[in-house]
Amino acid sequence: MLQSISKHFFHLLARSKTLQRLASTIGMRKPTSFARRFIAGETIAEAITAAQAVEARGLHLTLDHLGENITNLAEADAATRDYLAIITAIVDSGIGRNISLKLTQLGLDVDKASAVDNLRKILEHAEPADFFVRLDMESSRHTDITLEIFETLWRQDYRKLGVVLQATLRRSEQDLRRVNALGARIRLVKGAYAEPRSVAYHRKADVDAAFARMMNVLIVDGHYPAIATHDETMIDLTRRWAAEHGVTPDQFEFQMLYGVRRDLQTTLVNAGYRVRVYIPFGRQWFPYFMRRLGERPANVAFIIRSMFHEDQYK
């Protein structure tokens, strides 16, 4: 119950334009600000610097230029041009060539055809440079159309493309079978969106059970799956399941968020596992940050502690 209330509260905050403007003014004002613990910065240059530090620790990366739910095609075109420039900057920097993006950032809520065209422009620029592009999954009202677009482009031979599935959604186990049958790569997450009980599990135990069932399928029958969690119980379960079924650490990877559980990231790398860090950046960071707070009530206390004890993260 507390987790559900937390999610809804922080999602309401995420939609506040006033708070977004205030956060953009204050939250990134100095390198030690609380948001920079979890957001790499507002520019691609800052994101590349953060990515270089991540790779120096033996980790892999994916960059996400934050933004979603745009309301007109001009904004969608601008976001598309931003991603084309980001791809070029990544190539020039020499860091890992892996990006994540949201279809609503490319205009999905305005015009589906335009969003698909924008995604194609990005893929046409990314694939020759050997990028991997992941479509982030958004709220449940976008699940069908996201999977439809993903599947259409996959069948058009865009094969350096992956998608995300959320264990919290009741439909996701069926979606896993659908995407797995294509031979595509899946990132499994628990899910950060506030959803109605009719489509999503609300009890943590139910979400964990669904996550474990989906992980079991992905480790044995998936195509280089990404198990994205900071939950040590789920991570230990994944490690045991892989070992029991003869799946070596190079056949899957763990993924974690930038600034979260760096100790656990290092422990897994030292144990021989691949760990990819999701590095968000950009001016539209506030909604993302609020969802991270809303995922678990414990995150709020964690953020507050980080604000008053910034030196522990230096």
Image: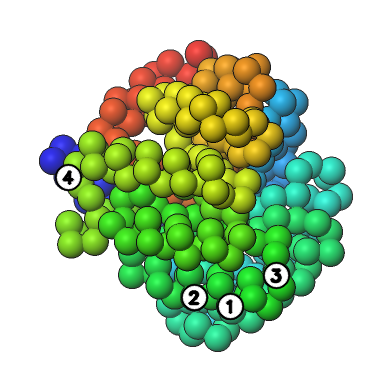
Compared across the picture, whether 310 is left or right of 225 comes to left
Cα distance, mark 2 to mark 1?
6 Å
Residue reaching furthest left? 1
Q: Amino acid at mark 1?
A: Thr
Q: What residue do we see at 62% from left, 18% from top?
A: 271
Q: What residue do we see at 73% from left, 31% from top?
A: 55
Residue 297 placed where, x, y %? 25, 33
Label 3, on which residue? 158
Q: What residue do we see at 32% from left, 61% from top?
A: 171
Cα distance, mark 1 to mark 4?
37 Å
Dot 3 or dot 4, earlier in sequence: 4
Compared across the picture, whether 251 is left or right of 136 comes to right
Cα distance, mark 3 to mark 4?
40 Å
Cα distance, mark 2 to mark 4?
31 Å
149 to 294, vertically: above or below? below
The answer to whether residue 168 shows anywhere in this view is yes
Whether tag 3 and tag 4 are in contact, CB under 8 A, the answer is no
How many residues crowd mark 1 within 10 Å: few (<14), some (14–19), many (20+)?
few
Q: Image quadrant of residue 208? A: top left
Whether tag 1 and tag 3 are in contact, CB under 8 A, the answer is no
Dot 2 or dot 4, earlier in sequence: 4
How many residues crowd mark 2 within 10 Å: few (<14), some (14–19), many (20+)?
few
Label 4, on which residue? 5
Q: Viewer-proximal residue, 202 or 26? A: 202
- Element under disc 4: helix
Q: Amino acid at mark 3?
A: Tyr
